[in-house]
Image (cartoon, coloured by chain):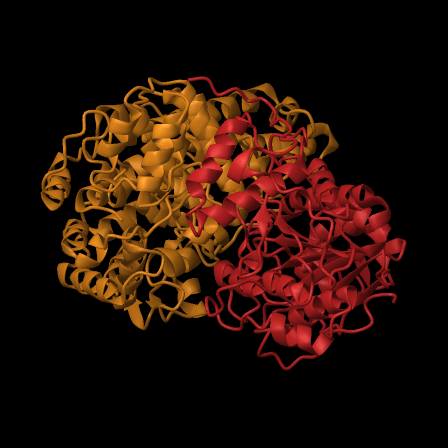
């Protein structure tokens, strides 16, 4: 059999019969307005102390040693923090006041399993596997209240990540190297699934997203810059997605971290730079939130890497951000100041950062957002993140 | 609704295949497969015996890293990436056209050749796995192989793993799927593939003779800081045995990590000449082993070199938390994303009683009424679906590159899971809008390239007494045999089991 790796071709116009391709909805949710949110999840526990090194802390040298040479010419935020050189574009955005870091932040999770940690940062729950839907989906539910039609929420990934799963309709899309199926087959598949409660709605959303993506000219998501451009193309227009999500892996740097971290950071930097450019005028109304499940150990381990830790860093970017700064209640790096003697101690609840940022961005009530997205927390949502 | 025969074919196996008999007695049909299963078919034995050294590749990489900083920056961790993986994006401008070719171009020729060879070996191993599943007289046993390989998931990327991922499944998983869990645990967790994947191969006891005498082995300390690495120990406890709620502590992780020091890959480094070969294909280097007794889960294990870790693994294999963890995953795979508690309890009890006899566990599964419930209980993963399609469509001996291409587009390449937890085994992870489109595209590809006659009759045979009216109607209305076959391949009956 032949498996030509042709580019996916444009699915245009409408199909006959039950499989009619819905035209992009021009009406959009009241709650979201034209505002956009891109959530970037760094899977594998990105090292916050490498991302944004606390070079002003006298304890850092003893913990990180020779790896600190990487920051010799790196951009400083204040006199205390230096941005990893592989994140140069993000650093430029920070200089321009359109990006900020939150440091020594963690979710309420205090164990060290990636899978439990990712479960919590995606569900927003307080116990692993205790919550079935994702906080981004609950955000879509909040924004859909009273809106004439549900907003588009979209994962740019081959599968819908847990953070986006739930009762609000979501879709996912990733470029494919497979030749597009014939329109006649697509229409017949619509009929085949029409009576199926699970496959029917999934299929309708698939056709809508496919039409939105059009001919992206890509066959995969390997190139970070093009992935960023694709995300922007799916979100910048009136009929586009208001909530988007992208996952990036490669952050579990147990060994030889200097090279490994840079190799994962460069694509993040390229992706966000391309996304920002691609959003064009819509960047003003766009917020990007970058987070990871937990931080890593403060001290380099025996193999030049870091192990699973607690406190870490998060990154916010956007045209409406009060950026150019680092939000931190710095806990210090002396042995007695480390969490359990090994991790950066968390002093800010990551849930407060996420809830505060999206509430201000979408003009939602912060307390209600916190209660819906991250129930069961004492901490108040962070305020004063956006310019408005 | 599924019939008992369609359950035996689909829920337990990979669907109807070439030359499959009519299933008259579903349980007997499954039990016969336990005897028909060949743990070491010739094609597998041939693959494994022709390996070149993994240690050689790692050594080569180390020399490359020392020689050229640029190569080190351009390459390693994800050394031979495959096209189309969503998670590992690359940011270098130089890699926009063909990331792999561009990254390879910057490397010394000897390493480039080795990487090319590694990739070829890996792609061929994947094809062996798929073609075995298509032609096997015991598709249920093949499903077991793939279930356990995912339980002990290794993912290629780190240098050397491309050579070892196939052998990990072929020699550490496959021979044990109807054997003892403890044997599989020791073989799989201590196989070179796992030792590299989870950084064990370079873990060194802080008080080992090697560390104490380091100056004599000298020269490499500044470039290569080395010491204890807890990665494998943590995943053994969290994923392979007890489970995340299995009642272990950080201290247990560290103690197991100390016991595991010395377990490494043959042919590696200056200490390599002191290596003792182990049954798993690994090597044990006493020189880097952390000396002394270890305390794990309240039990003390005296110093015993390589045997110390083996003894701990034996105890972990028969721990009640392990029985519960394994029973839950096994039940979830066959009986639904939220498996019936009664089934989990029965499997758990059998695991404890039989001492982890996996043939017994499989027989208990077949005998359990919960697995024979007529409504479909699972959404097929992309790998399952593709194998079932190829069996149904009569495709045999598909070329390695095509197999890899198809699995890449479906997002389910073997030995490529995004984390040590393996690929997810729930519908929510696979039943997405994009995934459906890809399956439809793939189905049309497959249908274009095979004989597409008698599709309705084949559908009735594939789903005996279980083809829905809605599907039958669409198949009858199709404009051609090929279109009917494509529709059958994406029908609800094919997508679920």
Which one is nearer the viewer's eye here, B199 or B475? B475
x and y, in percent, of residue B51 in the image: 36, 26
x and y, in percent, of residue A309 in the image: 58, 64
Which one is nearer the viewer's eye here, B151 or B284? B151
Q: Quadrant of the C terminus of chain A?
A: bottom right
Residue farthest toward the right in the current orientation of the protein: A96
Residue A299, picture quadrant: bottom right
Residue B130, picture quadrant: top left
User: Is A179 located above or below residue A257 in the figure?
Assistant: above
| Viewer can see residue B270 | no
Q: Which chain is red?
A: A
Tally the numbered discs.
0
Position of B24 compared to A53: left or right?
A: left
User: Is A293 located above or below residue B180 in the figure?
Assistant: below
Please give the name of the residue rendered at 68% of the width and 34% of the height, measured from the top-left corner. Answer: B69
| Viewer can see residue A326 | yes
Q: Which chain is orange?
A: B
Residue farthest toward the bottom in the current orientation of the protein: A378
User: Is A388 located above or below residue B438 in the figure?
Assistant: below
Which one is nearer the viewer's eye here, B149 or B196? B149
Position of B409 compared to A319: left or right?
A: left
Position of A118 compared to A280: left or right?
A: left
Q: Quadrant of the N terminus of chain A?
A: top left
x and y, in percent, of residue B180 in the image: 19, 50
Please give the name of the residue rendered at 24% of the width and 57% of the height, measured from the top-left corner. Answer: B314
Residue farthest toward the front in the current orientation of the protein: A17
x and y, in percent, of residue B431 in the image: 46, 47
């Amino acid at each position: 059999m032949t498996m030509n790796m042709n580019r996916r071709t444009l699915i245009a116009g409408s199909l006959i019969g039950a499989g009619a391709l819905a035209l992009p909805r021009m009406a959009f949710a009241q709650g979201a307005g034209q505002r956009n949110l891109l959530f970037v999840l760094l899977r594998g526990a990105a090292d916050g102390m490498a991302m944004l090194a606390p070079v002003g802390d006298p304890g850092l040298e003893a913990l990180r040693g020779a790896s600190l040479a990487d920051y010799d010419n790196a951009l400083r935020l204040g006199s205390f923090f230096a941005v990893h050189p592989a994140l140069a574009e993000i650093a430029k955005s920070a200089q321009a006041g359109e990006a900020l870091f939150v440091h020594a932040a963690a979710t309420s999770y205090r164990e060290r399993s990636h899978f439990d940690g990712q479960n919590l940062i995606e569900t927003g729950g307080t116990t692993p596997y205790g919550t079935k839907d994702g906080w981004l989906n609950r955000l879509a539910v909040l924004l859909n209240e009273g809106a004439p039609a549900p907003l588009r929420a979209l994962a740019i990934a081959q599968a819908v990540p847990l953070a986006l799963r739930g009762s609000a309709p979501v879709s996912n899309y990733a470029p494919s190297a497979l030749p597009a199926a014939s329109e006649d087959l697509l229409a017949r598949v619509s009929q085949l699934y029409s009576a199926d409660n699970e496959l029917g709605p999934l299929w309708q959303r698939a056709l809508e997203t496919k039409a939105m993506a059009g001919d992206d000219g890509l066959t995969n998501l390997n190139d970070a810059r093009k992935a960023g451009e694709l995300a922007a193309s799916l979100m910048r227009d009136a009929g586009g997605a208001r909530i988007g999500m992208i996952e990036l892996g490669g952050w579990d740097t147990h060994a030889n971290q200097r090279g490994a971290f840079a190799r994962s950071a460069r694509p993040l930097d390229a992706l966000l730079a391309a996304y920002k450019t691609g959003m064009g005028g819509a960047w003003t109304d766009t917020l990007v939130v970058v987070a990871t499940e937990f931080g890593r150990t403060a001290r380099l381990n025996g193999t030049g890497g870091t192990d699973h830790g607690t406190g870490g860093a998060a990154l916010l970017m956007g045209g409406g951000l009060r950026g150019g700064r680092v939000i931190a209640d710095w806990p210090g790096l002396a042995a007695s100041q480390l969490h359990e003697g090994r991790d950066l101690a968390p002093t800010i609840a990551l849930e407060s950062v996420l809830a505060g940022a999206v509430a201000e961005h979408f003009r939602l009530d912060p307390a209600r957002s916190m209660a819906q997205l991250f129930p069961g927390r004492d901490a108040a949502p962070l305020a004063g993140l956006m310019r408005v | 609704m599924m019939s008992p025969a369609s359950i035996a074919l689909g829920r337990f196996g990979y669907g109807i295949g070439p030359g499959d008999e009519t299933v008259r007695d579903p349980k007997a049909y499954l039990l016969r497969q336990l005897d028909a299963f060949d743990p070491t078919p010739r094609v597998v034995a041939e693959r494994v015996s022709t390996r070149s050294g993994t240690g050689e590749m790692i050594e080569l990489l180390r020399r490359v890293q020392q020689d050229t900083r640029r190569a080190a920056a351009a390459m390693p961790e994800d050394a031979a990436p495959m096209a189309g993986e969503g998670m590992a994006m690359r940011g270098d401008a130089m890699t926009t056209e063909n990331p792999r070719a561009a990254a390879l171009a910057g490397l010394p020729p000897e390493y480039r050749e080795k990487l090319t060879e590694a990739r070829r070996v890996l792609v061929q191993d994947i094809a062996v796995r798929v073609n075995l599943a298509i032609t096997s007289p015991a598709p249920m046993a093949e499903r077991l192989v793939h279930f356990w390989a995912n339980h002990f998931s290794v993912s290629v990327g780190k240098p050397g793993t491309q050579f070892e991922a196939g052998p990990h499944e072929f020699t550490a998983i496959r021979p044990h799927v109807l054997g003892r869990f403890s044997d599989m645990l020791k073989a799989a967790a201590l196989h070179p593939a796992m030792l590299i994947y989870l950084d064990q191969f370079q873990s060194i006891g802080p008080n080992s003779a090697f560390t104490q005498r380091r100056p004599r082995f000298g020269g490499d300390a500044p470039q290569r800081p080395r010491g204890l690495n807890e990665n494998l120990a943590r995943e053994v406890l969290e994923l392979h045995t007890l489970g995340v709620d299995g009642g272990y502590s950080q201290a247990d992780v560290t103690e197991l990590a100390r016991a595991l020091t010395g377990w490494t890959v043959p042919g590696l480094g200056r200490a390599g000449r002191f290596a003792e070969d182990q049954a798993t294909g690994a090597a044990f280097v006493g020189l880097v082993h952390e000396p002394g007794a270890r305390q794990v889960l309240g039990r003390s294990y005296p110093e015993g070199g390589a045997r110390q870790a083996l003894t701990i693994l034996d105890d972990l294999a028969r721990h009640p938390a392990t029985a519960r963890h394994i029973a839950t995953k096994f039940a979830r795979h066959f009986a639904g994303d939220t498996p019936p508690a009664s089934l989990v309890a029965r499997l758990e009890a059998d695991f404890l009683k039989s001492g982890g006899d996996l043939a017994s566990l499989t027989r208990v599964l077949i005998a359990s009424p919960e697995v024979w419930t007529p409504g479909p209980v699972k959404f097929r993963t992309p790998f399952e679906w593709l194998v079932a399609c190829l069996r149904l469509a009569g495709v045999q001996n598909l070329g390695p590159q095509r197999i890899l291409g198809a699995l890449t587009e479906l997002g389910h390449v073997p030995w490529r899971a995004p984390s040590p937890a393996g690929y997810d085994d729930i519908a929510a992870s696979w039943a997405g809008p994009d995934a459906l489109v890809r399956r439809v595209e793939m189905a049309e590809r497959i249908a274009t390239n095979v004989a597409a006659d008698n599709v309705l009759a084949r559908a009735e045979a594939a789903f005996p007494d279980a083809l829905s009216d809605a599907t039958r109607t669409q198949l009858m209305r199709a404009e051609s045999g090929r279109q009917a076959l494509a529709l059958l391949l994406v029908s609800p009956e094919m997508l679920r089991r």
